[in-house]
Image (cartoon, rainbow, N blue to C red):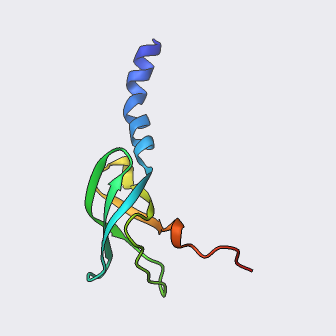
Amino acid sequence: MHNMLERALRPIKVKLYNMIGRAILNMVNDSTEIQLVQLHILSDEARDEVEHVQEYGLSSRAPAGGEVIVACVDGSKSQPIALVVGHSASRKKSLA
């Protein structure tokens, strides 16, 4: 009974696990309507042309090596979206 329940819940667990992840920024393409980034997702997979939607009125371009929070809509890794892109080495510190 326990194995049947585990087997039934496995697809749901995989989708939940895949929804949010971390990545390292490799490259930015800022010439398109929506900024596109190339990522190295921490599970050792590279992704090209991942959309990075930025806040209205705020535009930036993080250098390679930056940290990225990635969301996979519906738990499917086929279309990841870069939610947050930062670069801890160049973050302003000790702000008032």
Q: How many marks?
A: 0
- Furthest residue toward right: 96
Residue 17, picture quadrant: top left
**In the image, is 1 to the left or to the right of 51?**
right
User: At x 48% / y 88%, what residue is drawn?
Assistant: 57
Q: Where residue 5 sits in the image (x, y, percent)?
A: 44, 20
User: At x 42% / y 57%, what residue is drawn?
Assistant: 70
User: At x 44% / y 81%, what residue is drawn?
Assistant: 60
Query: Between 76 and 49, which is closer to the camera in this rendering?
Result: 49
62 up-or-down from 20: above or below: below
Q: Where residue 32 sits in the image (x, y, percent)?
A: 26, 81
Query: Between 40 and 89, which is closer to the camera in this rendering?
Result: 89
Q: Where residue 69 sits in the image (x, y, percent)?
A: 46, 59
- Furthest residue toward bottom: 57
Query: Between 74 and 37, which is closer to the camera in this rendering?
Result: 37
Q: Where residue 96 sits in the image (x, y, percent)?
A: 75, 80
73 up-or-down from 4: above or below: below
71 up-or-down from 54: above or below: above
**In the image, is 93 to the left or to the right of 29?**
right
